Amino acid sequence: MSTRGAAIGAAVIAAAATITAALITSGQVKIGGAPGDPGTNRNTVPSGRPGESKRPNIAVTPKSLELCAGESCAKEVHILSTGTATLKIDDIEFEGDSPGDFRHDDACANQALQAEDECTLKVWFEPAVAGAGSTAVLVIHQNLPGKPTYVSLTGVGQQPTTDPTASAEPTEQSAP
């Protein structure tokens, strides 16, 4: 073997030893231990960056909605799991000035979304008083640290009538 080949071989061995020492020092690789010992990692390679843990995350679109009255005016709220761990959607509710004037189809409540999974929730406005406008906040409770996720809601318009004859004028009929 030439002196140049020996120098390259020595450099590769030194680099491998330095990397191995760094992994052992950081706790990512453990040497020794009995089989089955939880402190021993055998035949495993760490994934991701050192110290990085899996975390859920959420993206909700849109951030606000303006809704007309009635279920036929329902709009969609998209909930996307953008983290590396399971996103757990718990309760979904309304808060604010007029929470009783809004409804949702409950499609995403109590769901577990894996990374990149999406759930679509339909939301609509049903005012208690015809012609009234209302505001509320859609509150999406989930397993993230801190506060829930919010979508601002504004409802406008009049709830469709349920009795089509209520506003009809009486008509006269002549006898045959």
Image (spheres, grey):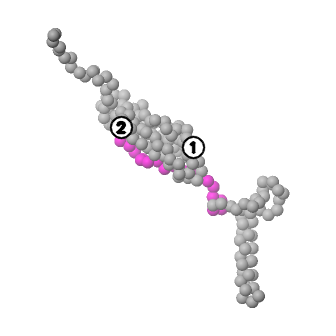
Q: Can you give x and y, in whole percent of width and height, for residue 167 in the image?
A: 25, 22
Q: Nearer the viewer, residue 21 or 5?
A: 5
Q: Residue at x 57, y 43 (%)?
A: 112
**Mark 2, residue position:** 73
**Left of 130 or right of it: where is 116?**
right
Residue closest to the far bottom: 2
| Mark 1 Cα shell of 10 Å, populated few (<14), some (14-19), many (≥20) | some
Up/down of 40 relative to 169, above or below: below
Residue closest to the far top: 175
Q: Is residue 96 magenta?
A: no
Q: The disc labelled 1 sits on which kind of residue? A: Ala
Q: Please, what is the dominant secondary structure of the magenta stretch?
A: loop
Q: Secondary structure at mark 2?
A: helix
Q: The disc labelled 2 sits on which kind of residue? A: Cys
Q: Quadrant of the C terminus?
A: top left
Q: Nearer the viewer, residue 32 or 175?
A: 175
Q: Is residue 57 magenta?
A: yes
